[in-house]
Amino acid sequence: MGEVIRETVYVRRASGLVRELGILESLSVALSGAIGAGINVLVLQGANLYPGANVPLAYVLVGLMTIPLSFVIAHIAGDLPRSSALYIFVSRTVNPILGFLGGWGIILGSA
């Protein structure tokens, strides 16, 4: 007896991986990437370049501004059935050209 293959939306068959991250986990991953990436270096640079500035308050304000964006990214990631990256989110929801440019922006920004 052969294996019965169900008709699916996608051309490729699934790998069997199951998405386990929820909203809270996705939010913590996004915030740790945005805030925790260079906090050790940037606090010292900010204090050195801008004497008298309240650098910890700036980090708190930026963290608060990052939360809505993290919720949006977590919501889009929950709606797309496969794991993907930011350029996929932008190309599927806005425009493929903007997704391409955003992907290159991420690559060049992290270089």
Image (tube, rainbow, N blue to C red):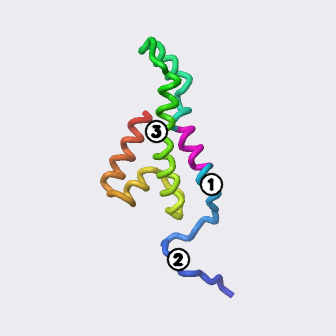
Circle 3 Cα neighbour tier, 10 Å, few/some/many (<14 / 14–19 / ≥20)? few
- Above or below 19: residue 48: above
Q: Quadrant of the N terminus?
A: bottom right
State the residue at coordinates (56%, 32%).
36
* Marks 3,2: beta carbons within 8 A: no
Q: Earlier in the sequence, mark 3 or mark 2?
A: 2
**Alpha carbon of mark 1 to alpha carbon of mark 2: how far?**
23 Å
Q: Amino acid at mark 2?
A: Thr
Q: What residue is shown with label 3?
A: 65
**Alpha carbon of mark 1 to alpha carbon of mark 3: how far?**
22 Å
Q: What residue is shown with label 1?
A: 21
Q: Earlier in the sequence, mark 1 or mark 2?
A: 2
**Nearer the viewer's eye, disc 1 or disc 3?**
3
Residue 11: percent from left, percent from top: 48, 72
Q: Amino acid at mark 3?
A: Met
Residue 83: percent from left, percent from top: 53, 57
**Residue nearer the viewer, 6 or 80:** 80
**Hey, which quadrant is residue 97 in on the image?**
bottom left
Residue 76: percent from left, percent from top: 48, 57
Q: What residue is shown with label 2?
A: 8
Q: Amino acid at mark 1?
A: Leu
**Alpha carbon of mark 3 to alpha carbon of mark 2: how far?**
39 Å
Q: Quadrant of the C terminus?
A: top left
State the residue at coordinates (50%, 62%).
80
Circle 2 Cα neighbour tier, 10 Å, few/some/many (<14 / 14–19 / ≥20)? few
Classified by dominant secondary structure, the portion drawn in magenta counts as: helix
**Nearer the viewer's eye, disc 1 or disc 2?**
1
Span of residues in magenta: 25-33
Q: Earlier in the sequence, mark 1 or mark 3?
A: 1
